[in-house]
Image (spheres, rainbow, N blue to C red):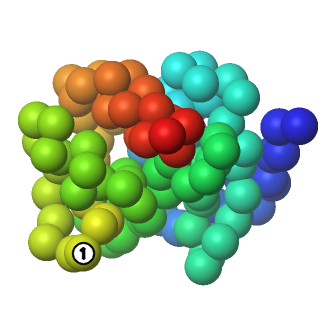
Amino acid sequence: MVERVDVDEYLSKYPDEMAEIALELRKFLLKTVPDLNEVIKWNNLFYELNGPVCAILIHKAHINLEFPRGREIAETGYPLEGTGKNMRHLKIKNPDDIHALNLPEIIKKAIELNSN
């Protein structure tokens, strides 16, 4: 069953510019994979399908689209940033970044890793 949260309420505490980018990113994620479950964990929007796929983390001047298994995704050649043990991210500063990135392939790779 696909879960949805009250995203408008969640985003109301953020500056309009960042909230708009987050909404555009959310729309893109759910259009790419309609079966994603959307939950709030650790005060961030998380998207799950057979495990965690990605999360939207809102900062003052950008949004990170975090991938819990990002190290494994990056090892297959996708340009994710970060130096943590497993987590990697894409930095999104405006709505155009969402469409300029190779997001559908990266998201599908994250889902594929959850299936293994």
Residue occupying the point 41% across, 60% down: 68
Label 1 sits on a secondary structure element that is loop
What residue lies at 70% left-to-right and 49% top-to-bottom?
38
**Residue, x 47% and y 51% (percent of image)?**
54
Residue pushed farthest right?
Answer: 1
Instruction: Provide residue 101's location: percent of width, then percent of height.
Output: 22, 29
Choose between 109 and 96: the one closer to the eye: 109
User: Residue at position x 61%, y 76% from top?
Assistant: 43
Q: Is residue 90 visible?
A: no
Place of residue 52 in the rendered image (x, y in percent of width and height, measured from the top left): 56, 54
Residue 76 lies, in percent from the top left, at 16, 36
Q: Is residue 106 visible?
A: yes
Badge 1: residue crowd in 10 Å (few <14, some 14–19, many ≥20): few
In the picture, which quadrant includes the N terminus?
Answer: top right
Look at the picture and state if 98 lies above or below 66. above
Q: Amino acid at mark 1?
A: Lys
In this orientation, which residue lies closer to the viewer: 26 or 33? 33
Q: Is 102 left or right of 42, judged from the image as shown?
A: left
Q: Which residue is mark 1?
A: 85
